[in-house]
Image (cartoon, rainbow, N blue to C red):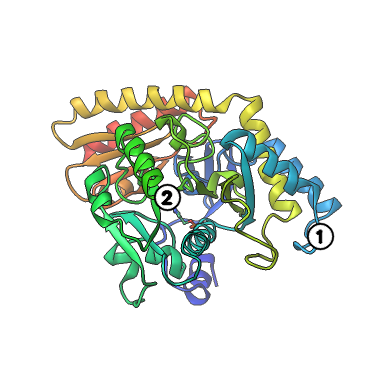
Amino acid sequence: MNTLERYNTFVMGNYAVAPMTLVRGLGAKVWDDVGKEYLDFTSGIAVNALGHAHPRWVKAIAEQAETLGHTSNLFRNPNQGLLAEKIVSKAGKGKVFFCNSGTEANEALLKLSRLHGKQKCGKEGEKYRVIVTGNAFHGRTFGGMSLTPQEKIQKGFRPMLEGVDVAEMNNLGSFERLITDKTAAVMIEIIQGEGGLTVASKDFLQGLRALCDKHDIMLLCDEIQTGIARTGSFFAFQQAGIQVDAFSMAKGLGGGFPIGAIWVSERFAEYFTPGSHGSTFGGNPLATGAALAVMTVIDEEKLVTHAEAMGKYFYEQLEALRKASGGKIVSIRGCGLLIGIEIHRETPDFIKAFRENGLLTVPAGMNVIRLLPPLNVKREEIDTAIGIIRESLIRI
Ligand code: PLP
């Protein structure tokens, strides 16, 4: 059996996989099993923050695996405290809970909002509703799916969790109208990573903060795709000059080693008491060691500023392409190195053409193609990508 036959025979078919097998990566490049080279502007969907096989990340994992790989949370491990301290230094005063993925981090936020509701009205089951935005994406577990009001995600799996209300992105009035005594939290993405890259405006986010304060509702943020220096600040909500009450992160945090986490502000950080929540793997020495290496390299290589500068450059080049595209490119969206190209029609042909020309990209909604280079991408690599995008557009 070859790789394709084995995959099709033994791996469940829930992904639309591209027709090649990747076997090696270095920096922003990957190679398939027949030696073809690609510029990887998927970064494993915003995960490989430092690109592939960054020596510091590789060393941290190898050394930790040789020393102590896993302990469970029955015991402390030094990396967990160090990583939590680092996250707090970026996010603000508060505490961190570790898990293994984005959807799990959102489950933790959801559980926290239930505890807030209970705290506010003295009993459970009364104040538990969460307001989310249409087109949001918060994951595939039942909590995550329930917070994701998209037909394609929920179809076949209903009933969802009760208690999710849907407002409109950048429409403060739509949130205000949904708030009742039963509302415990609002959950927001600053840029809708899977939902076509719509960006929440600064005014809207500031208004939402004030609204949550007025009603004493938790303002929760999903930074799973936007966090860890991806959008020109360490966390995307920081660009709006607001503080959220708690947020989730995953993806770029481990740079390719699975890890998720939530940061919770001081006021709400004591809601989780011993036994109230947990995870066997969450924050194990290997995962937190890998994430510590990612955070350290981001600081040492000044990747927040670099990603912002490269994002600006990329955006300008894409804008120039848009103007010359004869209407094929409708708009360029996003922020930092989370960029979307809105195409005049559905994207599969374009994604295929980019791939055949050696550039890997990700769809984001029906008409948007996402570009997610590693945070340390070089200007020449962006130039190469622009060349491929231009050439592919001409061909189609
Ligand atoms: N939230 C957002 C904004 C995401 O982009 C994703 C994944 O794409 C998730 C949640 C779910 O994360 P995971 O796939 O790690 O469970």
Task: Check disc 2 and give the amino acid type.
Answer: Asp
The extreme right residue here reads 67
N-terminal-most mark, 1 or 2: 1
Label 2, residues with CA under 10 Å away: few <14, some 14-19, many ≥20 = some
The answer to whether residue 326 is above or below residue 182 is above
As drawn, 39 above or below 347? above
> Does residue 73 appear in the picture of this structure?
yes
Foreground of the two, 82 or 272: 272
Above/below status of 123 relative to 269: below
- Please give the name of the residue rendered at 36% of the width and 73% of the height, measured from the top-left corner: 160
Pointer 2 residue: 216
- Tell me: residue 106, above or below residue 90: below
Q: Measuring from the top left, give residue 291's x and y in whole percent.
A: 66, 44
Mark 1 vs 2: CB contact within 8 A: no
Q: What is the C-alpha distance between the residues marked 1 and 2?
A: 35 Å
Residue 315 image position (x, y, % from top left) = 34, 27
The numbered mark at residue 75 is 1
Amino acid type, residue under disc 1 in the picture: Phe
